[in-house]
Image (spheres, rainbow, N blue to C red):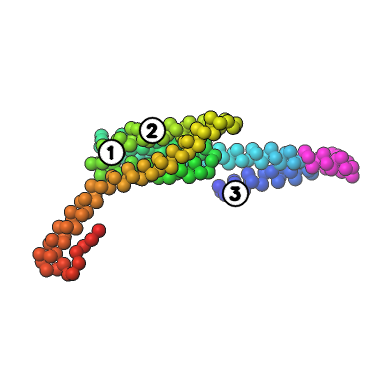
Amino acid sequence: MAGMGKGKLKLAPLYGFGLSWAGLSAALPMQKLWAILLTAALAGLVAFLLGRSSAKKEQKKHQEELEKAREAARAAAAKKSYGPDIDPIIAEGNRALSEMGRLYLSIKDTEVRQKINEIMRITDKITQDAIADPSDIPQIKKFMNYYLPTTIKLLNAYDRMSSQGIEGDNLDRSMKSINEMLDQAIVAYKKRLDSLFENQALDIETDIEVMNTMLAREGLSGTKDFEI
């Protein structure tokens, strides 16, 4: 049913053009050149207006569906509690992801949108690490309290500047600086995510050393120890 609805929206300009042409043809002397040109112009105008209206309706519907998905995700997260230390981090992470999702839809530059998408992907992994390893919470809080809000603040500034619809040295320079900053932010976010696995890496190395020692003691180690 949803596919049929989209199909009707896409065909609306064609229907409008055809009906307009038929109606005007019945009212105007189509054997005259001026009547043909007038009919074509008016029918084309109707098709254009219907096409623009259909595009707006489709975009609005997409935004409504995205917002519903966000609300469902927030509602699902709100139902489950991970404890007083973790819940605020999950809530802040969801809020940040929702805001970046809004900016992703608002900003038209493809390159910037790709960078926002990557930042959202890493942010989600960092947020979920609070559940997987609560010992990382101090590091995650530092990320949430400064790096993430600053990134969102700059993205909002980019969104405001890009929506002005004008060119200028100051606007162009500021937007370029923010775009370049996003590359640095992605690198920093990845390093932060990698650092969260430091404790796990140490635990794995300790487990492997213990395993190698036990196997050697039992004469089961063979010729080579386990390695990471």
Residue type marked 1: Gln
Q: Main secondary structure of the magenta part?
A: helix
Magenta segment includes 28: yes
The x and y percentages for residue 77 are 35, 39
Instruction: Give whichever of discs 1 and 2 has the lower sequence position.
Output: 1
Q: Residue at x 47, y 36 (%)?
A: 178
What residue would you read off at disc 3?
A: 4
Q: Is 37 placed left or right of 98 in the picture? A: right
Instruction: Give whichever of discs 3 and 2 has the lower sequence position.
Output: 3
Residue 40 visible somewhere in the drawing: yes
Instruction: Give whichever of discs 1 and 3 has the lower sequence position.
Output: 3
Is label 1 or label 3 in front?
1
Residue type marked 2: Pro
Q: Is 6 placed left or right of 42 in the picture? A: left
Q: Residue furthest left?
A: 217
Residue 64 visible somewhere in the drawing: no
Q: CA distance from mark 1 to mark 2?
A: 15 Å
What residue would you read off at disc 2?
A: 149
Is label 3 or label 2 in front?
2
Query: Callout 2: helix, strand or loop?
Result: helix
Magenta segment boundaries in residue numbering: 23-42
Q: Nearer the viewer, residue 159 or 79?
A: 159
